[in-house]
Amino acid sequence: MTYDPASANPLAGNPLETRADMSRALLDLFDPLLACFSKGNARVRLSGAAAHFDRAAADLEGFARPLWGLAPLGAGNGDFAHWHRFAEGLANGTDPAHLEYWGAVNGRDQRMVELAALGFALALVPEKIWEPLDTRARSNVIAYLKHARQFDYADNNWKFFRIFVDIALDRLGADFDRSLTRQYLEELEGFYIGDGWYRDGNVRRIDHYIPFAMHFYGLIYSKLVDDDYAKRYRERAILFARDFRHWFAADGATIPFGRSLTYRFACAGFWSALAFADVEALPWREVKHLCLQHLRWWRDKPIADRDGVLSIGFGYPSLLMSESYNSAGSPYWALKAFLPLAIAEDHPFWTSEEKAPEQAPPEVVPQRHPGMVMMRAGGDVVALSSGQENLQMRFGTEKYAKFAYSTRYGFSVESDERGFALAAFDSMLAFSDDGLHYRVRETNAEARLAGDVLYAKWSPFPDVSVESWLAPAAPWHIRLHRIRAARPLRVAEGGFAIARRDFELDTLSASDGAAYAIGEADFSGILDLGSSVDRAGLAQKAQPNTNVIVAKTIVPQLRGQIPAGETILVTAVLALGDPAAVASAWTRPPKAPDIAALEALVREKGVTVSAIEAPGQMP
């Protein structure tokens, strides 16, 4: 029988509707790790691939991250037969005399990240992993945690990691400097920008770290500690939920955007944390649906290796889209989604009947803080994006600076910076001066939101400036670019990437000013609406393993040349989960907007996108 990669997915076949289903899913995700525990149980090594940190830290990551799900399971009296492994591993990993010692933290260190999971578990289920330890082992654990917390943590969500260690130390009766806890709680306040939104540090970007880190940790804190910070975290989560629900499509998919997508269903962690903290930010039946429907979306994806170990990747195994800090254990932050296992089965999260949030008009929802206009197109949710900035990480440009991101079509990273002719350029405008190398938007000089229109000013080369306006016209969206260039350049602009079939079964069309592709279940097209230069259509067969959701894709593109001086490009883009769209929506394109009217709108109503504002400048 032919191997079906999706069958190795531990979630395959699980209805994921009840507390028992969720418990089973967690255990099914954990069980493949058992073969990878070391003899002393302190290390879990899942593959030979490396992250930028040392092997001991990677092995600690494999050990600690499952606890984000297992600790709630234990707190909710769920059955788990392997607590002895975690108790023994904790003792050996913190024992400097043991062969499996994790190594001391001596500066900013990945171990700090993983100790947050241990702190969480020690606070939540001390009877499982603390009380079985003898006096010497307990002394080693306390000493290890106290040593680690004296170092400076990264100036972002990492500050919560020391706070979680401190919560554990407090519950275990240890003596420690509590002023450090208060200092980080106050410094985290500096990341809050309003309306429930944070930044993850002093950066010009807002991504899934806001729900699955900042709010996730804040909500757990609010359950474990009763103070003014806890009250604030709860109030902010209620505000945030109203916006974040628009990031999810009816099928449970969320918008893949930004870094660390290999954490996969950690994207449901926010909804899970609301349940854990007993914060009814939306009606419980809706919170439950958003959480479980997202988990269900992952059931048929080939996200695990043959033995059921989660791979690095998003919709399938792919190192190409990963970060330098992703070790083989990294994907197990996905288990953050299992926090509701800590709450009793008579909690309204569990007793409510699921209900999808109302998707009443408007179908277009502008969000100033991330600089997005959320738009529903069929079953898809598209986020038109002003563009954010991440110049530090691999493919940071593709992860943050495209014009649009989609729950159904994801986005693509490029595989060759010298491959202008081969590149995907989905939801991007690329420039080349030699036909080989290319530049795309990496950062904005300006980004504004005016009603439901986004404006950005950016520069791919020092002698080229671009102004881009994005406007929804559901199910289409429109892009208008005004380019001022000091020399002639080649340009390429892409629509959405759709799945490509074997045996060339897809229908591809390319003509002057238009291109489309019809796949097994999707239509994707791009159309010139009257640019000042001619562009030719191309149905680009993208390089394999570039898209984050499916491994083989086709991207409709428009390609051409622009002269020195000013060029106007006007583009309409359509993608729908309906191959018949070629005879319906595709035949009814939107009209080209008036550039003067767009300029006036931005001038009169435009507000600066929070994500690109320098911290401290927010009103």
Image: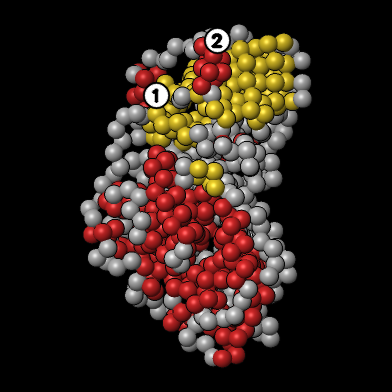
Tell me how far mark 1 sits from mark 2, CA to CA: 22 Å
Report the residue at 77% width, 21% height from top: 463
Instruction: Determine whether 462 is above or below 613 in the image.
Output: above
At label 2, the amino acid type is Ala
- Is residue 255 in view? yes
Name the one closer to the observer, 521 or 163. Answer: 163
Q: Please, what secondary structure does the residue beneath circle 2 have?
A: helix
Q: Is residue 564 left or right of residue 505?
A: right
Vertical position of residue 538 compared to residue 162: above or below: above
Total residue callouts: 2
Viewer-proximal residue among 145 and 14:
145
Please tell me how crowded label 2 is: few (under 14), some (14-19), or many (20+) other residues with Cα within 10 Å.
Answer: few
Q: Point out which mark residue 596 bears.
A: 2
Residue 261 coordinates in the image, percent (x, y): 53, 49
Question: In this figure, which residue is indicated by the disc labeled 1?
Answer: 474
Among the 4 quarters of the image, the one containing residue 269: bottom left
Give the farthest residue toward the bottom. 135
Q: Which one is in front, 355 or 614?
A: 614
Name the residue: 54% across, 24% down.
606
The amino acid sitting under disc 1 is Ala
Q: Is residue 30 visible?
A: no
Q: Position of residue 274 (x, y in %)?
A: 38, 56
Instruction: Name the residue rendered at 59%, 66% in the picture.
Output: 181
Q: How is the image coloured?
A: secondary structure
**In the displayed image of the protein, which residue is found farthest to the front?**
228
Badge 1: residue crowd in 10 Å (few <14, some 14–19, many ≥20): some
* Quadrant where the N terminus is found in the figure: bottom left
